[in-house]
Image (tube, helix red, strand yellow):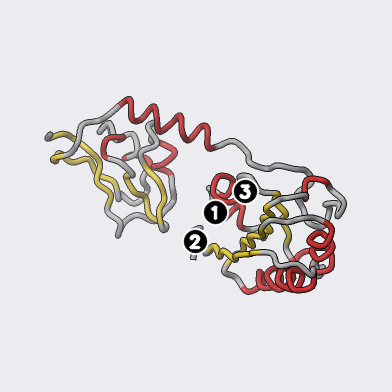
């Protein structure tokens, strides 16, 4: 059908995100630093996002598009509300503060995450923390070699798997080094994987 709908000029978009806050239907997302219309059926064509754009990257045009779907919008908003719940399974979560004897480590899947990943990757709760015990640390700021404490946790408990979530910056190398050292010294064969987050908030 022919109707009014927004158009985003990626060359003009500076990734400020103001349009996303202005869209009541949450039809927009920042993807790779640019605003994107995630579904044409979510856009009502009223253009509430237009005046918020400081660069004029968003315009309203008439073109062939699928109809605005209010029910689909409601379902999308409902899913986002459900997904906004915290997936933190225990407290404390800082590796520096957790007890080696804590019972929540038994038969757990560990997520060892660099501090900055929670701020760089917005969907960390649903994609990485869900059904895991989360430990956060920053070797550079903490100035601690965490390999000894990690080794003790791995030795004392039956750990199913370890996921190491780090940033692409060099200082996160210390976290991976500590984890790999603990995995090598614990005397057990434990599966692990390393996931790297870019400074733009994407998985490398």
Using the image, determine if residue 52 lies above or below residue 157. above
Give the structural element (helix, strand or loop) at label 2. Answer: loop
Q: Residue 74 versus residue 143: which sits nearer the camera?
A: 74
Q: Residue 100 versus residue 83: which sits nearer the camera?
A: 100
Instruction: First in sequence, mark 3 or 1: give its number.
Output: 1
Using the image, determine if residue 114 lies above or below residue 82. below
Instruction: First in sequence, mark 3 or 2: give its number.
Output: 3
Q: Which numbered disc covers residue 55? A: none
**Mark 3 and mark 2 residues within 8 Å of each other at the beta carbon:** no
Can you say which quadrant of the picture contains the N terminus?
A: top left
Cα separation, mark 3 vs mark 1, equals 12 Å
Callout count: 3
Residue under the image location 62 percent in, 61 percent down: 165
Q: Residue 22 versus residue 84: which sits nearer the camera?
A: 84
According to the image, label 3 marks what residue?
129
Give the structural element (helix, strand or loop) at label 3. Answer: helix
Q: Is residue 163 left or right of residue 77?
A: right
Residue 196 rendering spot, x and y as whole percentages: 56, 65
Using the image, determine if residue 185 lies above or below residue 107. below
Q: Quadrant of residue 59?
A: top left
Q: Is residue 113 visible?
A: no
Q: Residue 146 versus residue 120: which sits nearer the camera?
A: 146
Q: Nearer the viewer, mark 3 or mark 2?
A: 3
* Dot 3 crowding, Cα within 10 Å, few <14, some 14–19, many 20+: many
Q: Which numbered disc covers residue 121? A: 1
According to the image, label 2 marks what residue?
203
Instruction: First in sequence, mark 2 or 1: give its number.
Output: 1
Q: Is residue 91 left or right of residue 57?
A: right
Q: Quadrant of residue 182?
A: bottom right
Residue 105 rendering spot, x and y as whole percentages: 77, 50
**Mark 2 and mark 1 residues within 8 Å of each other at the beta carbon:** yes
Residue under the image location 30 percent in, 60 percent down: 11
């Amino acid at each position: 059908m022919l109707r009014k709908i927004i158009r985003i000029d990626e060359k003009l978009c500076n990734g400020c995100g103001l349009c996303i806050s202005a869209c009541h239907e949450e039809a927009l997302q920042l993807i790779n630093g640019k605003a994107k219309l995630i579904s044409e059926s979510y856009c009502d064509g009223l253009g509430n996002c237009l005046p918020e754009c400081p660069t004029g990257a968003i315009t309203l045009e008439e073109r062939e598009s699928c109809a605005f779907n209010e029910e689909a919008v409601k379902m999308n908003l409902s899913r986002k509300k459900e997904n906004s719940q915290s997936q933190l399974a225990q407290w404390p979560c800082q590796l520096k503060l957790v007890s080696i004897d804590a019972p929540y480590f038994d038969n757990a899947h560990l997520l060892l995450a660099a501090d900055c990943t929670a701020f760089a990757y917005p969907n960390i709760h649903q994609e990485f923390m869900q059904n895991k015990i989360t430990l956060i640390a920053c070797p550079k700021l903490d100035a601690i070699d965490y390999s000894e404490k990690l080794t003790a946790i791995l030795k004392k408990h039956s750990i199913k798997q370890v996921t190491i979530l780090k940033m692409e910056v060099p200082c996160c190398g210390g976290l991976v080094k500590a984890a790999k050292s603990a995995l090598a010294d614990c005397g057990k064969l434990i599966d692990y994987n390393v996931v790297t987050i870019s400074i733009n908030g994407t998985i490398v």
